[in-house]
Image (tube, rainbow, N blue to C red):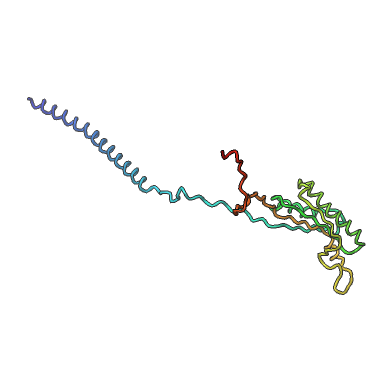
Amino acid sequence: MSRWAMLALLGVLAGCDAREAPGDNAAAENRSIFVEDDALANNSAAEAPKSILRPEVVPDEPKKAELKPLEVVVPFGGSGLKLDDAGRKLLDEMLANPTTAAGGTITIGGHTDTRGNDRDNLIASRKRAEAVRDYLLSKGVPAERMTVIAFGETRALVPNAKTDGSDDPEARAKNRRVEGQVALPVAAETPTAPADNGTAEAPAVDPKSQK
């Protein structure tokens, strides 16, 4: 083989080696990337936080507010026998209370001061109580829930006179009022069968059925 042929052959072989090297490097790099991805995936799976909640554990339900009997005093000191804006506001607050919404009975008691005769005071106290009842009716409260009682001057909230015996106009104004009392609803009772203590009579047996 001539010298020039030998040099050409060596040049071809060198070119092949140069082209094959990048392929090997790329394959090596790809394998490295795959190995790193697998390692990251395994690490992520190993480090993933586990839930500490047990499926059988059920969170507690929020406690409901405890209902209490409600009492509202509606003043009629300066309005005579009519319900004024202040009284309507008090009744609106009573209607918004959960105790009222629960459906218990409502007792409406009318009161007066001691001025005037007993009969007139009894009539005036009833008219005041009826004014409150009518307002509640207009707000959708059923009539069967409400009871109106006229007390007249018999149940003063404060003394109508001062300690020296003189008249006390401010005290009289406080006694002209209506007291609304909302009771808690009565839970429906489930009828139960009487307990058998051995004294119950056995059912009669037809003699013919024994044949």
**In the rendered image, the vertical position of residue 166 relative to residue 194, given as above or below:** below
**Quadrant placement of the N terminus:** top left
Q: Residue at x 45, y 50 (%)?
A: 54
Across and down, in percent, residue 123 comes to: 89, 56
Across and down, in percent, residue 112 comes to: 86, 61
Q: Residue furthest left?
A: 1
Q: Residue at x 27, y 38 (%)?
A: 31
Q: Is residue 45 left or right of residue 91?
A: left
Q: Quadrant of residue 160?
A: bottom right
Across and down, in percent, residue 79 comes to: 86, 56
- Depth check, front residue: 160 or 123: 123
Q: Residue furthest bottom?
A: 164
Across and down, in percent, residue 74 comes to: 80, 57
Q: Quadrant of residue 25?
A: top left
Q: Residue at x 82, y 56 (%)?
A: 149
Q: Is residue 47 left or right of residue 22?
A: right
**In the rendered image, the vertical position of residue 64 relative to residue 31, given as above or below:** below
